[in-house]
Amino acid sequence: MRELADITQYDSIAVVGLGQTGLSCVRYLLAQGVRPCVFDSRVEPPGLAELHQLDEQLEQHFGAFEAVTLLGMDLIILSPGIDPRTPAIQLAKDADIPVIGDIDLFAYQVQQPIIGITGSNGKSTVTRLTGELLAEAGLKVAVGGNIGVPVLDLLAQPHDIYVLELSSFQLDLCHQVTLQAATILNISDDHLDRYGSLYSYTESKHQIYRHARMAIWNRDQRSTAPHAIGIEQQLTFGSDYSDETAPALFGIERHHQQAFISYAGKPLLAANELQITGIHNLLNVQAALALVHAVGVDIDRCLPAARRFQALPHRCQLVGEWHGVRWVNDSKATNIGAAEAAIQGVRELVPGQLILIAGGDGKGQDFSQFRSALLQVNTLILFGKDADRIAPFHHHVVRVADLAEAVQQAQKLATAGSMVLLSPACSSLDMFRNYEHRGAQFVAAVEALYGA
């Protein structure tokens, strides 16, 4: 694609997609004195009322995209939720009309360093954590992108550095973004309805390295390693030991049944100092520290923020520790796969018993597939509609009437060094309004138990 010109040099600009991102593009363009044409495949898009508040006289095209109209544009700004392979969009690309996303538009305006974060899982956690680490070091940080704040809205205030969560859909539309540091955290099957294969999805993720000055990748998954960036421009993290020299500066080591994040071959941060739990989160913290290191910030200055950082609600969220027992709320685990990930993530970090509270509406899942993960659990406490369907797959089951009783039974069974994990593997709707309600009830029951 040819290089993006100053936005005011284009005679006709299309903003395609009137969601949160599209509206931010319209706001930005109007502020530059540019009046775009607005397109959406929906006849009544959800952002229509806000669009009319911005400028109700803008040219609008709602409903099925008309190729003739789009072919009359000089520049198309496409929202990430719209597949670039849509026939009318593809025709425009074939006609050499630039098709970009809001990230390119943002990068054209920004002189400060930009950090980019992608991956199948953990993007939001690492993005938020990286922002907090940099703020701890005294920088004025803006965090946005796929995490919820459209990037063009970040331009309203000056910042020292930008930390962006980038989805594969956004990366497909990035052509000219220079990132000071970029990472692919991990890759697993996702969005295959759009990409058709894991290979195509992986290649989409790898676009984050296209103009990166430093690549940070996961040693546990070679598929996250950059294809064309020199070793001197790489840092890695993983579940094995760190090296004294780059690129493998970050890792995990164990002493006396305790896990530590290590840096340059030496312990840096104990797992039990953190408010987030699980091996997957130790990898997330490493990635964030590596990103901070890659932009020249002393990681020692950032460690207090790492210790304070808390998980997103209901996602392996540490409720607290009392009498040596850690209580973790993973109510968001509404299916077997999510519960398996939580169990595997925490098991290695629990020196004592792992007590799992599970159950609810199984939505027709085959719980025989849960057997291998349940082998890592010492005691299984079950409640809810499909408790009887889960019970045959564990040797030590405690049946209870409700979540409050589950918490009481878990306290009786737990000893110092144990963890009680709520990771239901089921929907909550048989007994709760939603998974948030279930998680809140769990937290309330635990805190009531200890008078917290």
Image: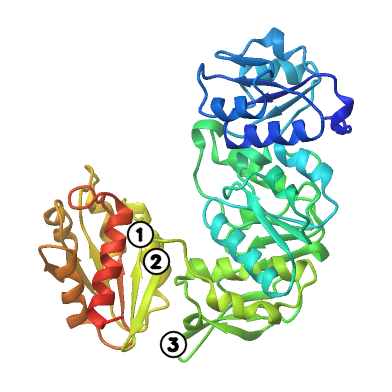
Look at the image and tell me in which quarter the C terminus lies. bottom left
Q: Which residue is mark 2?
A: 344
Q: x, y percentage for residue 102?
A: 71, 37
Pick out the residue farthest to the top: 68
**What's the CA distance linking mark 2 and mark 3?**
17 Å
Do tag 1 and tag 3 residues touch (Cβ < 8 Å)?
no
Q: Nearer the viewer, residue 326 or 139?
A: 139
Placement of 312 over or under 308, stated as above or below: above
Name the foreground residue: 277 vs 61: 61
Q: Determine which quarter of the picture holds residue 353.
A: bottom left
Q: Secondary structure at mark 2?
A: helix
Measure the C-alpha gap from mark 1 to mark 3: 23 Å
Callout 3: SS: loop
Q: Residues within 10 Å of mark 1 (few under 14, many from 20)?
A: many
Q: Which callout, 1 or 3, points at the residue further toward the start of the chain?
A: 3
Q: Amino acid at mark 2?
A: Gln
Query: In the rendered view, does 219 fall on the left or right side of 443?
Result: right
Q: Residue furthest bottom?
A: 256
Task: Tell me what residue is drawn at x 54 percent, y 61 percent.
Answer: 125
Q: Quadrant of residue 15?
A: top right
Residue matched to label 3: 257
Instruction: For residue 17, say whether it is visible.
Output: no
Q: Are marks 1 and 2 in contact (CB under 8 Å)?
A: yes
